[in-house]
Amino acid sequence: MEKAVFIIFAIVAVGSALNLIAQRNPLYSALSLIGTLASLSALYVTLHAQFIAAMQIIVYAGAIMVLFVFVIMLLNTPEDHPEIEKQQWLRYLAIPFAAVLIGEALYVFREIRNITLPAQGEAEHAIGTTWSIGTNLFTQYLLPFEATSVLILMAIIGAIVLARREES
Amino acid sequence: MLALLQQTSDFQIISRETVQLIMPEVILTVFGCAALVLDVMLPRALKKVVAWVSLSGVGLSLVSLGILYPNLVNNQSARVGFFEMILVDDYAVVFKLMFLIGAAISIILSIKYLDEEGEQHGEYYSLILFSVVGMMFMASAVDLLSLFISLELMAISVYILVGYLKRDRKSNEAAMKYFLLGAFSSGVLLYGMSMVYGLTGSTNLAKIAAAIPNVLKIDVVKTMTERSVMDMRYLLLLSMVFMAAGMFFKIAAVPFHMWAPDAYEGAPTSITAFMSVGVKAASFAMFGRLFLYGLPDLRATIAGNAADSVPSLPGWAVLLGVISAITIVWGNLGALTQNNLKRLLAYSSISHAGYTLLGLIAGNQTGYIGVVLYLFIYTIMNLGIFGCIIALKRRGISGDNINDLNGLIKKAPWLTVMMTIFLLSLGGIPPTAGFIGKFYLFGGLIETGNPWLARLAILAVVMTVVSLYYYLRFVKHMYIEEETETTPLAPSRVLNWTLSVAAVVIVLIGVYPKWFIDISQRAARSQALKTYSYKAEEAEQPLELPGSMGAPSR
């Protein structure tokens, strides 16, 4: 089961990464990047790293991708990609997809009552929870964590140095 | 809140002494940030102040290293800190000293170079300081995670510095190539690391070293009908090769050297100087940590199991031997036909990486001393030669074509003499320091008594003679050729003094190398004999296995 999940999501991740490079329209590339990030986050879940998986979705697929898409929208005028108009038939896929989504939601709502949560103490110390990540980050991995912050500062400075307009 | 703090203070996450261990790095980081802030505050005419502030940061860091050294770290006790993320021993301290000296000289070279280019900015110096922080952590990190992050900290700062001359297309191209190939090689390195983690279950180098004998065990299960062999050695070897490939890229060993000539030519000359010594030395420090601490059992031939017809496999000594032979030959042959000084020195630096690898292959005291000593000497002499090239730079003349050297003896006799000293040292001619370094590297190989290693040493000596051809071409242009242009040099007093000191030091080491050999020996000893680790306290077994490198054909 876990292997099957891994294989499916790995294929999706690599496939959307390839699609990202192959697409000519930057918006499609951005959407494929979301596919990669989302399937990566699924892989994190299989590794019992739920927190990282959630972060992956919220931070990358959510916040950062929205920024990406905004920038692409601001830079490109709509008439640059008329090929969007060509694929009229895609809209008819919306109906089955919506039906599947609604069915899924109904199923979850019905089943959620039957789930028993693990005891409080167990949950706290399980791998991949915020508690264990926070503890590890500020004890065992304190030095790499701080070094990474310097690393990111460096990357920001680099981006500014290289992208800044010359004042002369 | 306060109660919570008091509670955690019993828990002693980090003690004062642990913080002291990274004090040199902390000081550099603070000065790097200060340089950024100062750059914004100062008017254009005073930007040079940032350079001096950065230089004083390096100086302070040196002082703190000096205080740290005799008090906390000494020959008897290496200090582990931050949950075994770093290990501050003689090896780390000597390399940190090397990086700080290199950084100080590079900053001095940069002041003059950026003046000529009209690109005096504060971020430049803060990027240098941050990359030195990365290098210093690379020397002391003993965990795959901290090693990798410090490597990236160094590398990303240097990628940006290579592309610093935004209006120069060569600089852009160099940065692009270096960045893309560098990112790729980091990926390869990381892939190797992840497999090692998977096989040994730890990211800590000492724990990896302790776990490897278990991985190397071959389980042969025989049942009535079939025989299954559990052999993880191939996977381990594959991950070792991946990690080695990543490191070969960073030290620019053939066949991972393609980026070096372009990156060295396109980068600002002061950065070429900095990356040819700093990045290379730091990568060697990491190479040593990874392979001598982390994978000592993979050095020699990995025994198979004759009874079950499981073959023996070659260890990393063979891999390094082949790579260093190719590197030495290719680097020297490539340099022969170059007319651009920076490209020529790029090829020469490739060959020097090959020479330095020899010390790791030898795997004895002499070899390890050779590695540290040679990197130390190489730092000084290579910065010296690049300093001379920067001194030649003036309005309209880049100073990096070999014809710019024509008739230099008439224009600047002292500069010519200094340049000659550095060149002779790079070539390894006796009264200079380069000879001492090569003596230890080649001597280590001969000492092992292994015929293959002796042949490698002979090859290296022959190629050293070849290298003299292109080093002496400089000399010919400086002394014999007629002047082709008469623009006067634009001397800088600070640069001249620095180069003079470097030249004197190079001669001094050549004549009286004792002090440098002593400190290299300390570093080598901590590397070779103190397998600081969970297993080693009682049984102090040396990592070296004399003469154990099997012939490649076997």
Image: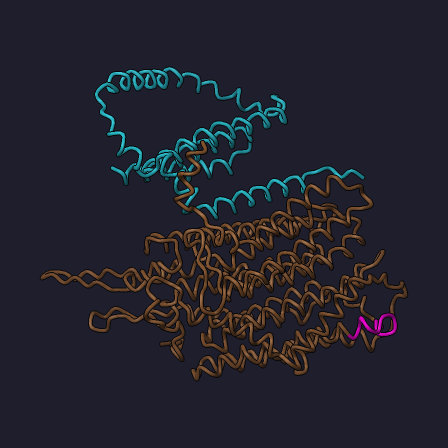
Chain colours: A cyan, B brown
Q: Residue furthest left?
A: B224
Residue B449 is left or right of residue A107, and the answer is: right
The residue sitting at 80% across, 49% down in the picture is B118
- In the image, residue B431 above or below residue B42: below
In terms of image quadrants, where is residue A40?
top left
**Residue B484, percent from left and from top:** 87, 68
In terms of image quadrants, where is residue B411?
bottom right
**Residue A81, percent from left and from top:** 58, 25
The stretch in magenta equals B407-417
Q: Nearer the viewer, residue B66 or A35?
A: B66
In terms of image quadrants, where is residue A94?
top left
Residue B11: within the magenta?
no
- In the image, residue A70 above or below residue B496: above
Asked if residue B454 can be seen in this view, the reply is yes
Provide the major secondary structure of the magenta segment: helix
What is the quadrant of the C terminus of chain B in the image?
A: bottom left
The residue sitting at 89% across, 63% down in the picture is B487
**Residue A62, percent from left and from top:** 47, 27
